[in-house]
């Protein structure tokens, strides 16, 4: 087995143990490989080792990779980074899901383009659970209004859940707190808005096991799979 292959097996084992600690099975947690800065060869290795779900941060970088990706290697690509409005059309052409939707004007652009060309897009709303100003995402206080506005004005944008990036500062306790907050928000929002929101995308290389214990349904791993970024 390649190094990447054995790292993936180790991570799958950790995922499955953390899932069990949260009273679930490994199937309840998707493993997304985050491929920003990674070469097509590295991504192909990950596919060969069984990865089928990929996350990219930037539309332009993703376009090169996705447009040249071999069709027979069936896989799913989602956007997990900040999306500029002028790249909304391109994002819709590339990704099966936008996991980083964070504002109404962008949702409305997506809606308008979809109305024109047909179809719909699944999305997660990104929440800034730590309050760190470097982070994208709607504030916890602004989430309900944003979701209501999207539900009311963007019927082609299908909200499937929430996404967050854990805090960099403050250690383990504040990371756990951020994840717990996201799970609580999902429960509150699905109750208030009468909406099924199955997905909670949270957990990266340094905190994915804790995220799973807090209810994550999708962990987004870059360094833990591919090693340090340049
Ligand atoms: C880069 C990135 C990841 C992966 O980070 P690692 O620390 O390499 O696992 C996950 N989510 C988002 C939104 C990212 O930008």
Image: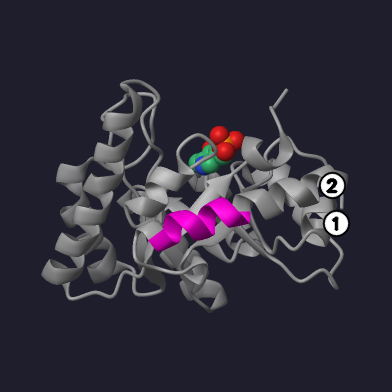
Identify the residue under disc 2: 40
Q: Nearer the viewer, residue 226 or 37?
A: 226
Q: Which residue appears at 39% of the width and 47% of the height?
A: 211
Q: Residues within 10 Å of mark 1 (few under 14, many from 20)?
A: few
SS at circle 2: helix
> Does dot 1 land on a helix, a strand or a loop?
loop
Q: Is residue 88 left or right of residue 142?
A: right
In the image shown, does 104 or 68 lie closer to the viewer? 68
Quadrant in which ligand 1 is drawn? top right
Residue 182 percent coordinates (x, y): 27, 50
Give the side of residue 155 with respect to residue 38, left or right.
left
Q: Quadrant of residue 210?
A: top left
Please state the horizontal and vertical placement of residue 153, each as a whole percent of the image: 28, 68
Can residue 187 be seen here? yes
- Horizontal side, residue 118 vs residue 45: left or right: left
Q: Is residue 82 visible?
A: no
Distance from label 1 to label 2 (Cα)?
9 Å
Report the magenta residues as a range: 12-20
- Above or below 12: residue 57: above
- Which residue does the image show at 31% across and 69% down from the upper left? 197
Residue at the disc numbered 1: 68
């Amino acid at each position: 087995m390649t190094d990447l292959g054995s790292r993936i097996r180790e991570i799958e084992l950790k995922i499955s143990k953390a899932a069990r600690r949260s009273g679930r099975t490994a199937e309840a947690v998707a493993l997304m490989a985050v491929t920003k800065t990674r070469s097509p060869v590295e991504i192909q290795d990950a596919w060969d080792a069984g990865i089928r779900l990929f996350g990219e941060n930037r539309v332009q970088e993703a376009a090169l990779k996705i447009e040249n990706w071999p069709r027979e290697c069936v896989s799913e690509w989602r956007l997990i980074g900040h999306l500029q409005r002028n790249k909304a059309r391109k994002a819709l052409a590339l990704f099966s899901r936008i996991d980083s939707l964070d504002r109404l004007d962008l949702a409305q652009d997506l809606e308008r383009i979809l109305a024109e060309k047909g179809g719909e897009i699944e999305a997660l709303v990104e929440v800034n659970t730590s309050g760190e100003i470097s982070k994208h995402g709607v504030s916890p206080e602004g989430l309900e209004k944003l979701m209501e506005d999207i539900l009311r004005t963007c019927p082609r944008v299908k909200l499937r859940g929430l996404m967050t990036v854990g805090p960099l500062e403050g250690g383990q306790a504040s990371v756990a707190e951020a994840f717990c907050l996201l799970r609580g928000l999902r429960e509150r929002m699905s109750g208030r808005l009468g909406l099924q929101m199955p997905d909670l995308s949270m957990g990266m290389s340094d905190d994915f096991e804790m995220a799973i214990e807090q209810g994550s349904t999708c962990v987004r791993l870059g360094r833990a799979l591919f090693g340090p970024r340049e």
